[in-house]
Image: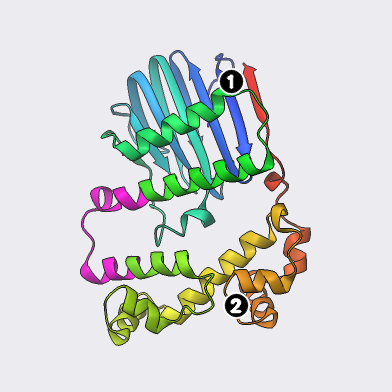
């Protein structure tokens, strides 16, 4: 997120906690670009906007007046926001892989949510408080902040999906519940299709049919989520002390061989290679304040 005209002075505060970035921007009348297509292709942006006047537009669309509220920009979109008068934005950049625990898929276009709810207000207040503190966060504090932001972001998506996208079909709603359950419990090696069906209160046959509608299987989704979990552990420096065998256990795989096979099929790499080439942005936490 940045000013289209770089000469416009902005007061910016930023802090990173693992793969999560928190940002505060404030200024006077400005046109801002929210770009998750090129600058943050692996993140969704949750931006809380307070402005006297506000308008938004997609890349090739018209300007549309909107009220202050929450803007959710998924990966792969480019949005312009025009803030009139004094304004303040509090934002969180959250990795798309982490949000997969809460929703089957991220929204395909930007959400502009004018109605504020208790959860997103609490999320905004938490981010603002984190950014207001000058003390350097400890590793444990950074870890806790990252997980709290991810959990609040995912819950906001889950809470709003029906209101924004419209009511889901019964099959889609059942599939979403199953995917969310799988994402939350995939680290349990005892999770299997029969247990998923039992916990979402349907028959295994019905659940298999629902997944077949989108060319997927329950077992395939469990394996996919375990692979995502294993990848997140392998690419996080906080888990460098864990062996591949321990990673396989934490991510629900029956053996290190099963883990290696899944990583190879999905990412074309070995577990060691994923650790070697992980994104440098995952290291440490920093806080920057700039008047620009």
**Residue at horizontal 55 percent and vertical 34 percent from the top:** 22
Instruction: Give the labeled residue for mark 1.
Output: 6
Identify the main secondary structure in magenta. helix
Measuring from the top left, give residue 175's x and y in whole percent: 33, 70
Q: Quadrant of residue 7?
A: top right
**151, above or below 204, in the image:** above
Q: Position of residue 61 (x, y in %)?
A: 35, 37
Q: Is residue 184 above or below residue 166?
A: below
Total numbered badges shown on the rendered structure: 2
Seen at 53% across and 76% down, the residue is: 223
The mark nearer the N terminus, 1 or 2, is 1
Spot the residue most to the bottom: 205
Where does label 2 land, which residue? 253
Q: Which mark is residue 143?
A: none
Coloring scheme of the render? rainbow
Q: Residue at x 43, y 45 (%)?
A: 153
Is residue 197 rendered to the left or right of residue 216?
left
Is residue 152 rendered to the left or right of residue 226?
Answer: left
Q: Is residue 45 visible?
A: yes
Q: Nearer the viewer, residue 200 or 211?
A: 200
Check if residue 159 falls in the magenta segment.
Answer: yes
Instruction: Give the secondary structure at mark 2.
Output: loop
Mark nearest the camera among 1 and 2 is 2
> From what the image shows, is residue 225 above or below residue 279?
below
Task: Compute the Cα span from label 1 to label 2.
Answer: 49 Å
Horizontal and vertical percent for residue 197?
Answer: 33, 79
For the residue carrying disc 2, how many other residues have a C-alpha within 10 Å: few (<14), some (14-19), or many (20+)? many
The location of residue 51, given as percent across then percent down, is: 36, 19
- Magenta-tinted stretch: 157-176
Q: Quadrant of residue 111?
A: top left
């Amino acid at each position: 997120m940045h000013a289209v005209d770089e000469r416009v002075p902005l007061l910016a505060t930023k802090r990173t906690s693992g793969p999560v970035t928190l940002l505060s921007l404030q200024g006077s009348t400005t046109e801002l670009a929210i770009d998750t297509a090129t600058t943050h292709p692996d993140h969704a942006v949750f931006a809380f906007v307070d402005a006297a006047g506000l308008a938004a537009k997609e890349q090739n669309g018209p300007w549309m007046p909107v009220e202050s509220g929450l803007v959710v920009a998924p990966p792969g979109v480019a949005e312009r926001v025009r803030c009139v008068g004094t304004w303040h934005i509090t934002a969180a950049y959250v990795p798309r892989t982490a949000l997969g625990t809460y929703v089957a898929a991220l929204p395909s276009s930007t959400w502009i949510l004018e109605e504020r709810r208790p959860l997103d207000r609490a999320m905004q207040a938490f981010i603002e408080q984190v950014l207001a503190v000058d003390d350097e966060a400890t590793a444990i504090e950074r870890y806790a902040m990252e997980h709290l932001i991810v959990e609040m972001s995912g819950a906001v998506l889950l809470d709003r999906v029906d209101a924004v996208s419209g009511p889901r079909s019964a099959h889609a709603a059942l599939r979403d519940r199953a995917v969310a359950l799988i994402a939350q419990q995939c680290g349990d090696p005892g999770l299997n299709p029969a247990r998923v069906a039992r916990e979402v209160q349907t028959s295994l046959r019905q659940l298999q049919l629902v997944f077949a509608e989108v060319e997927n299987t329950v077992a395939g989704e469990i394996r996919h989520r375990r692979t995502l979990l294993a990848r997140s552990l392998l690419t996080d420096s906080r888990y460098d002390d864990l062996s591949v065998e321990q990673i396989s256990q934490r991510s629900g795989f029956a053996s290190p061989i099963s883990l290696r096979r899944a990583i190879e099929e999905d990412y074309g790499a070995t577990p060691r290679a994923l650790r070697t080439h992980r994104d440098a942005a995952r290291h440490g936490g920093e806080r920057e304040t700039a008047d620009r």
